[in-house]
Amino acid sequence: MTDPSSQPAFDLNAFYRDLPRRYLGSGALITDAEDRILVVEPVYKDTWEIPGGLVDPGEAPRTACARELIEELGLAIVPGRLLVMDHQTLPPPRGDSIMFVYDGGMLTDPATIILQATELRSFRFLPPDDLETVLNPRMASRMREALRARNEGILIERHNGGIIT
């Protein structure tokens, strides 16, 4: 029998430090009266995005979504229910992430949008079938699923773009 006192002490800090890391992103599905989806053009990349951004340490994804909507668009929207959760495994340096899409409702007056000029160049509303003209295919698919989830009252869980049933 091994003497427990001869075993090295378990290092809980090392255990937590060595756990896999994922980053979180949070955004909103915002549509107009015609169910066209709001997309934004960042100043720092070639492809467009949805309103939203990274979740800060200690911040809930829903809170991050609301914060980003105020920061990027000047819109004080309380995000509705979660529509899509998408786990992605991408090669380094990006790695694993979990992306959340919340219901941002319908915007009846686009003139209320005040773009944060240091982050966004422009915005527009696109029909779901035209999303690939500005979004990467993964994001376009995610947003069509978000619209379906809102219309059907469901939550869609995805892994690398595929729906988990």
Image (cartoon, grey):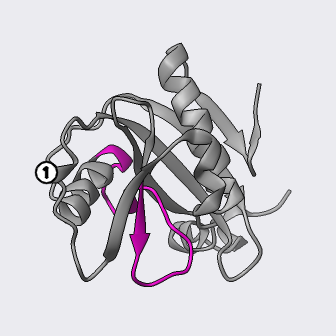
The residue tagged with tag 1: helix, strand or loop?
A: helix
Residue 83 x, y percent position in the rendering:
49, 32
Where on the picture, by quarter, is residue 73? bottom left
As drawn, the residue found furthest toward the right would be 1
Q: Is residue 26 magenta?
A: no
Residue 26 vs residue 88: left or right? left
Seen from the viewer's position, the closer of residues 116 and 2 is 116
Residue 101 x, y percent position in the rendering:
47, 43
Rendered residue at 65%/63% (across/down): 136
Quarter of the N terminus within the rendering: bottom right
Residue 15 vs residue 42: left or right? right
Amino acid type, mark 1: Thr
10 Å neighbourhood of mark 1: few (<14), some, or many (≥20)?
few
For residue 49, above or below residue 157: below
Q: Which region shows up in magenta?
A: 39-62
For residue 161, above or below residue 67: above
Residue 135 x, y percent position in the rendering:
59, 61
Residue on which the image places disc 1: 112
Rendered residue at 22%/35% (across/down): 108
Q: Main secondary structure of the magenta part?
A: loop
Where on the picture, by quarter, is residue 95? bottom right
Quarter of the C terminus within the rendering: top right
Residue 155 x, y percent position in the rendering:
55, 25
